[in-house]
Amino acid sequence: MDNQLQLDAIQKSIIDDGITPELATSATQLVFGDGNPESQIVIVGEAPGKQEDLQGKPFVGASGKFLNEMLQMIDLKREDIYITNIVKYRPPENRDPKPDEKKAFLPYLQRQLEVIKPKILITLGRHSLNCFLPDLQISKVHGQPKRVSLSLKEGSEDTFTVVILPLYHPAAALYNPLQRQTLIDDFAQIPLLLSKIT
């Protein structure tokens, strides 16, 4: 079965399983993921915002425009990569995702990654980083690639190795010129990183 069909099945199962019913009720729609299901690069954000909720795609607001600009800088387009979030429904008033919400969505995110099997996993912001590497602080490890083995299913021995590149969230960088430049510099490493891995 091709990757897109498998991803569609995961998306359907989130709805069928009734994940985070309170969030589902307050959101316009599920924002599952977007981009190339065969990509070597997966970007994981935190949760959809207002524009994402309305359009049903991750990173289409101001943060998404900034992300698109950074992709252009390294000669990539959104269609070349795959973008998703930990939490797939917009939290009310754009509040941070709660621990139980992140936990509820984690198995589905793991299944997404299992299907795509990226070489590089880019985490945007601390929630995304701590989902995979709970003991690290984004301010200390941003831009530092970490090779990790991710388990594919809870309690399973199955793992795949991926390089995690922790980055600041574009939303934070939009209003902080210093962080913006740091994020651009960190992002610029991606092509070299990819060439070393593949």
Image: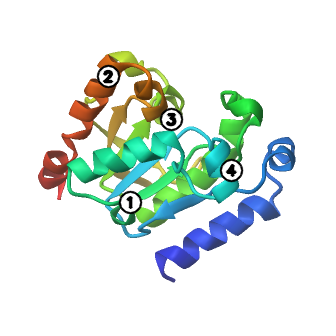
Residue 158 visible in this rendered orientation of the protein: no
Q: Earlier in the sequence, mark 2 or mark 3?
A: 3
Q: Are marks 2 and 3 in contact (CB under 8 Å)?
A: no
Q: Are marks 3 and 4 in contact (CB under 8 Å)?
A: no
Quadrant for the C terminus, please.
bottom left
Closer to us: 59 or 196? 59
Numbered badge on residue 78: 1
Q: Point out the frontmost of discs 4 and 2.
A: 4
Numbered badge on residue 128: 3
Query: Callout 1: few (<14), some (14-19), or many (20+) C-alpha neighbours within 10 Å?
Result: some
* Amino acid beneath label 4: Asp
Q: Point out the frontmost of discs 2 and 1.
A: 1
Query: Callout 3: few (<14), some (14-19), or many (20+) C-alpha neighbours within 10 Å?
Result: many
Query: Is 140 on the left or on the right of 85, as rendered?
Result: left
Query: Is 42 on the left or on the right of 87, as rendered?
Result: left
Numbered badge on residue 141: 2
**Disc 3, SS:** helix
Q: Position of residue 17 (x, y in %)?
A: 80, 59
- What distance separates the C-alpha of mark 4 from that of mark 2? 30 Å
Residue 175 visible in this rendered orientation of the protein: yes
- What distance separates the C-alpha of mark 3 from that of mark 4? 18 Å
In the rendered image of this protein, does residue 60 appear above or below residue 198? Answer: above
Q: Are marks 4 and 2 in contact (CB under 8 Å)?
A: no
**Disc 4, SS:** helix
Q: Earlier in the sequence, mark 2 or mark 1?
A: 1
Q: Point out the frontmost of discs 3 and 1.
A: 1
Q: Which residue is mark 4?
A: 53
Closer to us: 103 or 157? 103
**Disc 1, SS:** helix
